[in-house]
Image (cartoon, rainbow, N blue to C red):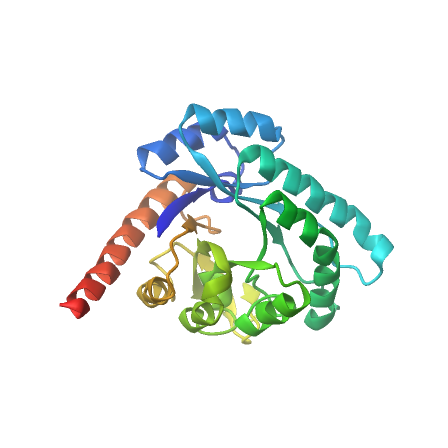
Amino acid sequence: MKFCMMSYTMWRQGEFDPRAMLELTCELGLGAVDVVTLSGLEASEWRRMLDDYGLRAACHTFFADLNHSEAPARQAGVAEVRRGLEAAAVLGAPCVMVVTPGRAGTPREQSRRNYLAGLQEVAEEAESAGIALTVENFPGADSPFVTADDFLQGLREVPSLRLTFDSGNAATGEDPAQSFARCAQYAVHAHFKDWRLAESGRGLLGLDGRRYQAALIGEGILDHHAVLRAMRAGGYQGYIDIEYEGNEYLPEAAVRRALEYLQVALAEVEGESKSAMC
């Protein structure tokens, strides 16, 4: 397992300097970046910058509005996925992730059908390009993909679909370690994040009925050691994004603190495994 820079963590608070992010990525010893949207740049420009710093694109993440029941209404979103696949090919990213929020007033099962119908239209193109087409566990009571069951249902409809496992988002619906274990063979990328429980009427309403607000990895309620154990047991060897959606820390400080915590946690988990083998 390897930790990965996530451009979303760096740009979501406002100002964003891609080269400063890449310099930080190198300083921290991270070998890859999840390029979340192109941030107004061309994919070719991103590729030149990544090459300049000796980095790779671990994934290309983007939004595509596929959440419509009628095929004509989905076509703009389908076209966006195609553009995302083209950008991923330029970036050299082995996978793409389509962000899949729910829609207020639309049952999550219907939203799932809508997304899957759109993804079916591009699945063969992604396979032909050698790029894994993924969705993540996305949080929210109306989200179409939260639990392992949600993803596995999607897999039955789109057999080439793969998972970007999000530990924090999975935790809003079920135990994230158990969730990963059920989908381990389909997980090609991963996000780590953390939450605190929020008071009634505040924060994000999860599928489990609890409310959540963003916390820095290691400062919230998730048992990251348990998730890392499950991922190690499942043979996961890919990248894990460091995601932060709070505002208590500036992005650089958040990534530094979270990475330090995760490196210690991973070393402890790996140490446990070696001890068990002795």
- Residue located 40% across and 29% down the image: 54
- Residue located 45% across and 65% down the image: 184
- Residue 219 lies in what quarter of the image? bottom left
> Where is 47 relative to 227, above or below?
above
Instruction: Classify the position of the C terminus by image quarter.
Output: bottom left
Q: Position of residue 40 (x, y in %)?
A: 63, 31
Whether residue 38 is visible here, answered yes or no, is no
Depth order, front residue of 109/244: 109
Q: Position of residue 75 (x, y in %)?
A: 81, 49
Q: Position of residue 16 (x, y in %)?
A: 51, 32
Q: Position of residue 154 (x, y in %)?
A: 64, 67
> Where is 253 relative to 190, above or below?
above
Whether residue 186 is visible here, answered yes or no, is yes
- Residue located 63% across and 71% down the image: 153
> Where is 68 relative to 126, above or below?
below
- Residue located 24% across and 59% down the image: 270
> Where is 34 relative to 173, above or below?
above
- Residue 68 lies in what quarter of the image? bottom right
Depth order, front residue of 36/207: 36
Depth order, front residue of 140/87: 87
